[in-house]
């Protein structure tokens, strides 16, 4: 075990190799290349090598490299290639580190004599904390992977590196892969013939050294380790690399010298280096088998033979589709470029929407151009109508610039529903217009710069006359702004309450176009709503908030205290003076099955942040779309991929409008006739 305070960021990044692996002490590049040539005739296998191990490491055993040169041109290319020189430098260092616990000893030495130069060249600033660019809420990944004690509290983790090098190990215990907090693992110079697939659990690893073993192949699950920056497999018996390594988009150094590697991989490494090898693997990755279909979970099938109940049944779909401009190689480099390309993804998204046959579709991250020129025309063919508003930044842009601004789009089946009203809630403008917030610095510095919006639609069922409010929202993403998320949702609920009270007084509509008169439920009067809270309410969206958040608490419990932890002592007018509340009895539709395992799936964040909320007093959940096949995910580091076009998955729920409660008419008081005011004697 290595103490994290003395070994943090142990191995150097690619750009610093020359500094930390200097020429000298029999490690010069020319000497290494000549060593390859001089020992070519000593290999027992064509293009390969063999050697024996002792339990105490390699000692002074000579190595022979399988990377032969076939002609003068290749020889010259190897001598002049900086990438191949790097391989030779690194493999020389690797071969000098065969002693038991070599790396741990080096760190201990560095701790004693910080200025001493040690084999391997420790670079204290090479490794940084795990990239949190995909993180939406909750603690960072490295905190989530820490162990919890018997009391449920996170235990202090003083070490994150493990050195099992030079131990003569023939197998690795599965217990090792429970140490998911590790960022460096040394299993070099042992007698391993394979790496268990469970190694894919160590998702925080930034360095893995499996050099000097007897590996003939690498497990595809290594592709799950997307935080890897250095992967050393020197001096094994590898002839090829799994395509899944293409997911290692942050890898700086791939050490493969000393293996009978295929000529194609070898030549790519010589000419263009590690990044080119990884890109080639990623872009040529074959299409995997699709996952099993997600189950449809039936929660309530009563009323299936009741025509009125069926008329008041509807399905809602919620989906953040990952806007075209946000799908960059920097954010989603673990996926092939053609998978991330919008031309591939948009067709798959459209097919998912149509195949769902949902009555109401709420999409987030839809840009103006794709709404008007692609989704609206395509869905119109299936008799959908839509409502779209872009984020508030579009107000300051010209017509051309507006096209790329994303927002929220709500589609509804025009054969079932009619649109009575629509509204947009601009959180930035709403905040600045509030008298109680105008003079607070936190509003100007934290809330106002965020241009998130919510789209509100007021619908009426053409057949039954029942009405509902559908809110579609995308809350700010950054986990450092949990206070802003909570304030945005509080403003959403405040505005929804105002609109609901207004719409409760709206007279009935006589427009029933699109519905056969024989299908109208004339025998059942259309419901009326005494208050706004009596109108059925659906709230869909990407809330960028986990269940352990103020946002979830506000929506599910109806209120949060003014001193909630998420507010972080910020000042937000009445919200931080009186607390936040709303009048609706809301519940997450998926809480009926304990929520999904995730709705957002990326290497940096996997969790539930998307929800379909409903009012329990007038709606009942009858069905839900289930989880993604867990076995399928074993080799999938993140979405989007060939089968899932967004980093989010779609949510779909079926609801039934509850019949209105019948008023209990109290009988008149009994009439016992006139009573005499005085008694006769």
Image (tube, rainbow, N blue to C red):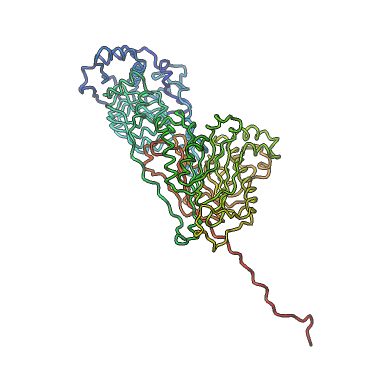
- In the image shown, does 551 or 568 lie closer to the viewer? 551
Position above or below: 524 against 111: below
Question: Residue most toward the bottom?
Answer: 681
Position above or below: 96 against 366: above
Classify residue 24 as left or right of residue 261.
right
Residue 229: tell me if it is visible: yes
The C terminus - image quarter = bottom right
Q: Position of residue 480 (x, y in %)?
A: 56, 34
Q: Position of residue 288 (x, y in %)?
A: 34, 37
- In the image shown, does 401 or 233 lie closer to the viewer? 401
Residue 92: tell me if it is visible: no
Residue 106 picture quarter: top left
Q: Position of residue 130 (x, y in %)?
A: 47, 30
The N terminus - image quarter = top left
Residue 638 picture quarter: top left
Classify residue 346 as left or right of residue 100.
right
């Amino acid at each position: 075990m290595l103490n994290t305070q003395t070994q943090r960021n142990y191995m150097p990044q690619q750009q610093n190799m020359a500094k930390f692996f200097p020429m000298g002490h029999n490690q010069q590049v020319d000497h290494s290349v000549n060593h390859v040539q001089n020992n070519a005739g000593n290999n027992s296998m064509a293009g390969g090598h063999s050697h024996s191990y002792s339990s105490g490491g390699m000692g002074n055993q000579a190595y022979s490299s399988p990377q032969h040169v076939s002609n003068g041109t290749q020889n010259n290319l190897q001598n002049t290639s900086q990438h191949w020189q790097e391989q030779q430098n690194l493999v020389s260092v690797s071969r000098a580190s065969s002693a038991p616990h070599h790396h741990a000893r080096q760190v201990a030495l560095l701790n004693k004599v910080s200025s001493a130069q040690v084999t391997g060249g420790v670079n204290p600033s090479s490794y940084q904390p795990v990239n949190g660019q995909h993180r939406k809420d909750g603690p960072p990944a490295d905190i989530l992977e820490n162990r919890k004690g018997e009391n449920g509290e996170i235990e202090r983790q003083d070490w994150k590196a493990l050195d099992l090098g030079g131990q003569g190990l023939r197998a690795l215990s599965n217990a090792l892969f429970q140490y998911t907090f590790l960022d460096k693992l040394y299993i070099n110079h042992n007698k391993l013939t394979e790496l268990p697939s469970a190694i894919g659990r160590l998702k925080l690893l930034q360095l893995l050294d499996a050099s000097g073993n007897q590996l003939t192949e690498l497990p595809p699950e290594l592709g799950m380790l997307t935080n890897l920056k250095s992967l050393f497999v020197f001096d094994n018996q590898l002839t090829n690399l799994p395509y899944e390594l293409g997911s290692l988009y942050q890898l700086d150094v791939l050490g493969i010298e000393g293996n009978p590697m295929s000529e194609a991989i070898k030549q790519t490494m010589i000419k263009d280096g590690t990044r080119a090898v990884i890109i080639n693997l990623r872009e040529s990755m074959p299409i995997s088998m699709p996952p099993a279909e997600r189950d449809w979970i039936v929660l309530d099938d009563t009323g299936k033979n009741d025509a009125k109940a069926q008329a008041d049944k509807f399905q809602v779909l919620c989906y953040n589709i990952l806007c075209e401009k946000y799908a960059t190689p920097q954010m989603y480099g673990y996926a092939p470029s053609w998978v991330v390309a919008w031309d591939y993804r948009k067709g798959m998204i459209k097919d998912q929407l149509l195949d769902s046959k949902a009555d109401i579709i709420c999409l987030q991250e839809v840009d103006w151009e794709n709404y008007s020129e692609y989704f609206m025309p395509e869905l119109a063919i299936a008799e959908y109508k839509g409502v779209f508003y872009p984020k508030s930044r579009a107000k300051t842009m010209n017509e051309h610039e507006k096209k790329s601004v994303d927002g929220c789009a709500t589609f509804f089946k025009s054969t079932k529903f009619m649109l009575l009203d629509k509204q947009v809630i601009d959180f930035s403008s709403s905040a600045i217009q509030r008298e109680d917030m105008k003079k607070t610095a936190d509003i100007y510095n934290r809330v106002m710069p965020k241009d998130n919006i919510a789209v509100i639609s007021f619908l009426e069922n053409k057949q039954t006359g029942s009405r509902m409010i559908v809110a579609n929202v995308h809350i700010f993403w950054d986990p450092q702004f949990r206070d802003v998320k909570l304030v945005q949702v509080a403003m959403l609920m405040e505005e929804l309450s105002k609109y609901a009270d207004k719409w409760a007084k709206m007279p009935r509509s006589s427009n029933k176009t699109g519905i056969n008169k024989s299908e109208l439920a004339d025998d059942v009067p259309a419901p009326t709503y005494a208050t706004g809270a009596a109108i059925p309410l659906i709230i869909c969206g990407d809330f960028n908030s986990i269940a352990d958040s103020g946002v979830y608490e506000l929506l599910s419990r109806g209120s949060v205290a003014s001193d909630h932890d998420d507010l972080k002592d910020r000042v937000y007018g009445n919200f931080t003076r009186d607390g936040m509340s709303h009048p609706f009895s809301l519940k997450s539709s998926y809480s009926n099955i304990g929520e999904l395992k995730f709705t957002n799936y990326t290497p940096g964040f996997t969790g539930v942040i998307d929800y379909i909320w409903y009012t329990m007093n007038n709606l009942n959940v009858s069905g839900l779309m289930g989880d993604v096949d867990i076995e399928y995910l074993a080799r999938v580091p993140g979405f989007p991929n060939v089968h899932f076009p967004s980093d989010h998955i779609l949510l779909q729920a079926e609801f039934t409008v509850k019949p209105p409660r019948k008023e209990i008419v109290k009988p008149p008081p009994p009439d016992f006739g006139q009573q005499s005011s005085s008694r006769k004697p």
